[in-house]
Image: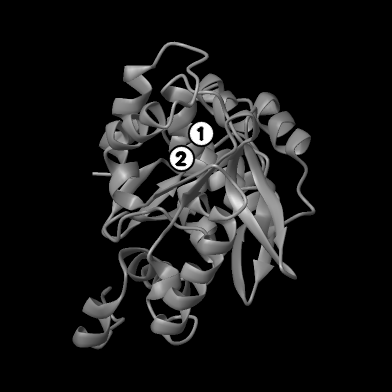
Amino acid sequence: MLPGVYANTEAWHELAPWDRYLAKVHAVSARHPELVICGPSAAALRGVSLARSDTPVHVLDPRGTGRTFGAVKTVTSQDTREIETVEGIQLTSSADTIVDVVRGSTPAIGLAYADALLRRDPTVAIAQVQAINEARISSRNRRRARWALQRTTGIPESVLESLSLAIMEFGGFELPELQIAFRFEGWEDHADFFWRRLDLIGESDGDVKYSGAFGNPLDAIRAEKRREARLRRQVSAHLRWGWPEIKQPDLLTTMLQMARVPRVGQPDQVMLASLRRALQ
């Protein structure tokens, strides 16, 4: 994994890419506990990672020069950041981490990071991260960060939901209501997306819930089928998509178009292409 840090080869290859990256962050911190973890590495420690396993570990070095050596990338900045210690590891605060990763990401990925980090730390206010972005001495990527920071809510419950919203906007579609509750026969189920005028539910479905990480995957599949059946009884139409439609946004935009979701703006092909490249 790193010089002086080793992992069981079989166990390492069984890890998902984001878990490999998190393991690498922990390894760097264990070898160098004096370092301050920042950017996507701090986000990973806070439970949010969209980084590839070969992404270097980001560490803050205000007085040094930004460079990458081995598995570590040093980040320099004139701006001070709030530093916290979590389980013995020094890392940037949630608010500073949000601004760092949004500035360093494409707009859609930045939105996914911001939503997820806000959801995990409800003490952080949206106005707070917007203010930090505007107050930073460095103007690098400030304008790009505004797109995500003006749209983040912390309401989406998964990265897939946040990326789906980005594709909807890039595609020029009317945006839905989020996490609407439907009650039926004593059950309360929440739909990811709801277009009320169309009586249409949309749901983005990842594979994690069926992986066995949260219990018997067959039980999870059966429970999800029952949940979907309850929702279908209450609306006129129901759409479901997953990672394939996110990685190829044209698939999702075609689904929305076929479901007659109104277009309220022109598609932004540049933004759609940027997301496609980011997820390759």
Q: As rendered, which of 46 and 67 lies closer to the eye?
A: 46
- Percent across and percent down for residue 70 are 26, 59
Image point (38%, 70%), residue name = 19
Q: On residue 261, which mark appears?
A: none
Residue located at (57% from left, 29% from top): 175
What is the C-alpha distance between the residues marked 1 and 2? 20 Å
Q: In this view, does 199 lie to the left or right of 130?
A: left
Residue located at (41% from left, 60% from top): 206
Report which quarter residue 106 is drawn in: top left
Badge number at residue 103: 1
| Quarter of the picture holding the N terminus | bottom left
Kind of residue indicated by mark 1: Arg
Q: In this view, does 150 lie to the left or right of 262?
A: right
Q: Residue furthest top?
A: 266
What secondary structure is found at the residue carrying circle 2?
A: helix
Q: For the residue carrying disc 2, how many other residues have a C-alpha within 10 Å: few (<14), some (14-19), or many (20+)?
A: many
Q: Is residue 31 at all visible to an observer of this figure?
A: no
Pick the front one: 122 or 192: 192
- Neighbour tally class for label 1: few under 14, some 14-19, many 20 plus, Cα within 10 Å: many
> Dots 1 and 2: beta carbons under 8 Å?
no
Left or right of 271? Residue 125 is right
Residue on which disc 2 sits: 164
